[in-house]
Image (cartoon, rainbow, N blue to C red):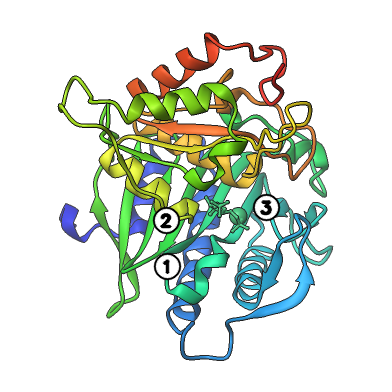
């Protein structure tokens, strides 16, 4: 098969073959996920037509309004993943607790953590949204997966990726052997390799942040963004701002073009900084992908991949993208009075 016609299924299989001890479970679970994503993509594309857009009125675990497409995405992934025998437990943004595998189905060696439809506040404006996933190998020995199987550092991830429902539908994923992107060819319903071995430029020209929150930023973030607005020595121009407000879309652009994506904590009350993005199924998988593409991801004081979650829906500040740009941000933080013992707290 020529490279231009490499399907994601074939690619996942070939990546797993590089590990002679592999059981096929990871391949199976990623295949199942691509099927769920095709269903979600179909529903998202119909968003403006079908009566599926709008709020259900219920609040999800993190207090957001659950939109009907979120619920459809959640249900689609759950039903695609619960019976394959590859998983022992799941975690979703839409569910407060761990999601067990039903007793009637076999349990497998992996844990799946996911955000079924991130960026859903953009749905009605036809803006790109996405599904984010993270895979860990279980640490419990057998039977039902446990909370301990889920509360893991990003550095332990076996695989991570996202589906982007944009002008085309894509999957970008890594199993720790580089980052690859595949675009859905709707006429045949297959994801075809379109982005071979993605590498983020070491330094970028763009920054991506919700600048409306400037009054709530911590001081190093404020100084860093001011710095990016000065004339850059390499280009003779300041960095340009690009912000969609949809993590998968903002991350995807940053991954391909370089630069930095930032979501700092809200420090309106400096005693109680409030990050927004969730570690386990939003930030950690993106950090793994960025790392595999040669970029970096930091909380300001710590590599995102080293952060130990305390609970399922923990949130962390994050700055990720081109390594040189992230290192400069870290320098701004190191020069400030942040408490290194607790990177989400500020003195
Ligand atoms: P969600 O999980 O409720 O969709 O929220 C996460 C989204 C991200 O996609 C995006 O990066 C961020 O929230 C945008 O937040 P803001 O509107 O505060 O800029
Ligand atoms: Mg989300």
Question: Which quarter of the figure is the N terminus placed in?
Answer: bottom left
> CA separation, marks 2 and 1?
8 Å
x and y percent of residue 121 in the render? 57, 66
List x then y, in percent, for residue 204. 27, 32
SS for dot 1:
loop
Foreground mark, 3 or 2, reads 2
Name the front one of labels 1 and 3. 1
Give the tally of numbered discs.
3
* Label 3 to label 2: alpha-carbon separation: 33 Å
Residue at image location 35% in from the left, 57% down from the top = 8
CA gap between label 1 and label 3 equals: 32 Å
- Read off the residue under disc 2: 244
State which quarter of the image contains the C terminus. Answer: top right
Residue 197 is left or right of residue 20, and the answer is left
Q: Are marks 1 and 3 in contact (CB under 8 Å)?
A: no
Identify the mark at residue 127; answer none if there is no mark: 1
Mark 3 and 2 residues: CB-CB less than 8 Å, in contact?
no
Q: Is mark 1 within 8 Å of ligand 1?
A: no
The residue at 69%/64% (across/down) is: 82
Front residue of 42 and 273:
273
Q: Which residue is mark 3?
A: 87
Q: Is residue 73 above or below residue 212?
A: below
Question: Are dots 2 and 1 in contact, CB under 8 Å?
Answer: yes
Q: Which residue is at a point 80% across and 64% down the rendered structure image?
A: 102
Which element is circle 3 on? strand
Q: In the rendered structure, which disc, 3 or 2, sits on the residue that comes first in sequence?
A: 3
Mark positioned earlier in the residue sequence (1 or 3): 3
Q: Is residue 222 visible?
A: yes
Q: Is residue 337 above or below residue 247?
A: above
From this view, report whether residue 313 is shown above or below residue 170: above
| Identity of the residue furthest to the front in this view | 215
């Amino acid at each position: 098969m020529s490279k231009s016609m490499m399907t994601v299924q074939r690619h996942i299989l070939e990546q797993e073959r590089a590990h002679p001890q592999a059981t096929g479970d990871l391949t199976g679970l990623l295949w199942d996920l691509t099927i769920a994503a095709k269903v979600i993509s179909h529903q998202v594309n119909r968003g403006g037509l079908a009566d599926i857009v709008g709020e259900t009125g219920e609040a999800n675990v993190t207090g957001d309004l659950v939109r009907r497409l979120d619920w459809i995405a959640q249900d689609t992934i759950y039903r695609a993943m619960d019976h394959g025998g590859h998983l022992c437990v799941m975690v979703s943004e839409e569910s407060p607790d761990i999601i067990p595998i039903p007793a009637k189905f076999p349990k497998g060696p992996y844990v799946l953590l996911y955000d079924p439809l991130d960026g859903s506040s953009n749905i009605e404006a036809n803006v790109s949204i996405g599904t984010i996933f993270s895979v860990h190998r279980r640490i419990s020995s057998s039977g039902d997966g446990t909370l301990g199987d889920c509360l893991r550092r990003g550095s332990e991830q076996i695989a991570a990726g996202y589906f982007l429902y944009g002008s085309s539908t894509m999957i970008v994923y890594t199993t720790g052997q580089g980052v690859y992107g595949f675009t859905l060819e709707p006429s045949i319903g297959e994801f075809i390799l379109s982005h071979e071995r993605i590498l983020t430029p070491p330094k970028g020209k763009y920054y991506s942040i919700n600048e409306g929150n400037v009054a709530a930023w911590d001081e190093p973030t404020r100084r860093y963004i001011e710095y990016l607005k000065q004339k850059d020595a390499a280009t003779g121009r300041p960095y340009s701002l690009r912000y969609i407000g949809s993590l998968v879309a903002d991350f995807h652009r940053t991954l391909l073009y370089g630069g930095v994506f930032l979501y700092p904590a809200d420090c309106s009350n400096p005693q109680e900084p409030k990050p927004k993005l969730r570690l386990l199924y939003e930030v950690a998988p993106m950090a793994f992908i960025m790392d595999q593409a040669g970029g970096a991801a930091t909380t300001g004081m710590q590599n995102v991949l080293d952060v130990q979650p305390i609970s399922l829906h923990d949130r962390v500040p994050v700055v990720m993208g081109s390594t040189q740009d992230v290192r400069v941000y870290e320098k701004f933080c190191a020069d400030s009075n942040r408490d290194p013992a607790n990177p989400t707290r500020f003195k």
